[in-house]
Image (cartoon, rainbow, N blue to C red):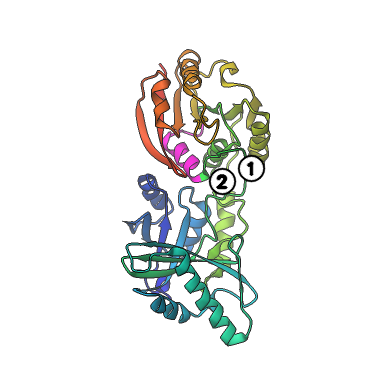
Amino acid sequence: MYLYQSNNEYYGQISDGLEDLGRKELAWLGISQMTPEHRGFRFKADHASLYRANYKSRLFTRILAPLVSFPCHDEKKLYDMARNINWSDFIQETGSFAVFANISDSKINNSHFASLKVKDAIVDQFRDKTGVRPNVDTKFPDVWFNLHIRENKAVISLDTSGGSLHRRGYRRKTVDAPMQETLAAAIIQMTEWDGDETPLYDPMCGSGTLLCEALMYCCNIPAGYLRNDFGFTRLPDFDNALWQDIRNKSRKQIRKIPEQLISGSDISPQAVSAALANINKLPGGKVVDIMKTPFENIGNLQNTLIVCNPPYGIRLDKGKDMGPFYKKLGDFLKCNCQGSTAYIYFGDREYIKKVGLKAESKIPMKNGGLDGRLVKYVMY
């Protein structure tokens, strides 16, 4: 019996700063027993809750099923314990797998080296038993395994998500410096948008990530709607009938989007093309209006929720002074957006003061390696 089977405990990874939203999302998914841990939550779940969390979570990046846990001070111990796991429970000899590792405050201090040791244990076991070994595929493996070592305690887990959950499947086209899907979903939730009567507009939509996440939130589209594969299907106790029932019931709860509720624009024709291609992959996406125009030519956006991720001169327009751009954005909000509320993500916090408007709040949010801020402005 594996560790997750004996205690029904799993581990969900989530980005720094999203813990409060993550706690609420787990409760929304019907999970009540949860404990905050390093970069995530440990929680108890039955099979249905595990499948539902992977299919519907908008904020978590991976959900891991711990297989074994043991003290680990050297590479021999790591190899021997990994070699004792019956890997044929999860992967076929003709299949493929990958091992990713996270290590901190331990005698073993090289994550790549540690992942290779687990990989060797898997390969050696299959070779000794059958003479045939599964392949290593670090991009599209059949099964993802995780090794976590902290303070010389190792946990080997199966990734029940089958790769990061931020990859929704709608991003068929992209532009430079796109916003990660989980961050965009968090921003939509932080706005407390009603998703019903108040129009939502993104005046610098890029490849449409914020618009796609708004559409999925508004229409109750599961975050994993377009994903074809999940890692929990590789667990030895996987219940396919239960999974199909959960997926079918979730899809029946999708609702139609009210017309003219979600729209956006961008100055770049390439961005508009990408945004349309991406959002049209989702149910209801064809009623979302996206046009090519600079934000200063949009006209009035009154009584609207405005969300956007403007360029901030770090990855885009590198070296360019973006101060005048943000001053123009502030003037647009002040003159054209009476009665509206704007949530603007600043990848470079120095530009917040260039907008020239009083901020209602500044929420720390990371996007990749950027320690940005989500700033709220209310226009009266």
Q: Is residue 59 magenta?
A: no
Q: How many marks?
A: 2
Residue 360, above or below 221: above
The reply to whether residue 1 is visible in this rendering is: no
Residue placed under numbered mark 2 in the picture: 221
Q: Earlier in the sequence, mark 2 or mark 1?
A: 2
Residues drawn in magenta? 182-196
**Quadrant location of the C terminus in the rendered image:** top left
The N terminus appears in which quarter of the rendering? Answer: bottom left
Q: Is residue 104 above or below residue 206?
A: below
Kind of residue sitting beneath label 2 = Ile
Q: Magenta stretch mostly in which secondary structure?
A: helix
Residue 44, quarter of picture = bottom left
SS at badge 1: loop
Residue at 34%, 59% (x, y): give it: 33
Does 90 appear above or below 187?
below
Q: Is residue 183 magenta?
A: yes
Residue appearing at x 58%, y 74% in the figure:
91
Compared to residue 268, the image places residue 229 above or below, namely below
Residue displayed at 64% across by 33% down: 271
The reply to whether discs 2 and 1 touch (Cβ–Cβ < 8 Å) is: yes
Q: Residue furthest top?
A: 335
Cα gap from disc 2 to disc 1, whole angstroms: 8 Å
Asked whether residue 134 appears in the rendered view, the answer is yes
- Disc assigned to residue 173: none
Residues packed near mark 2 inside 10 Å, few (<14), some (14 to 19) or many (20 plus): many
Identify the residue under disc 1: 283
Q: Classify mark 2: helix, strand or loop.
A: loop
Asked whether 338 or 97 is in front, the reply is: 97
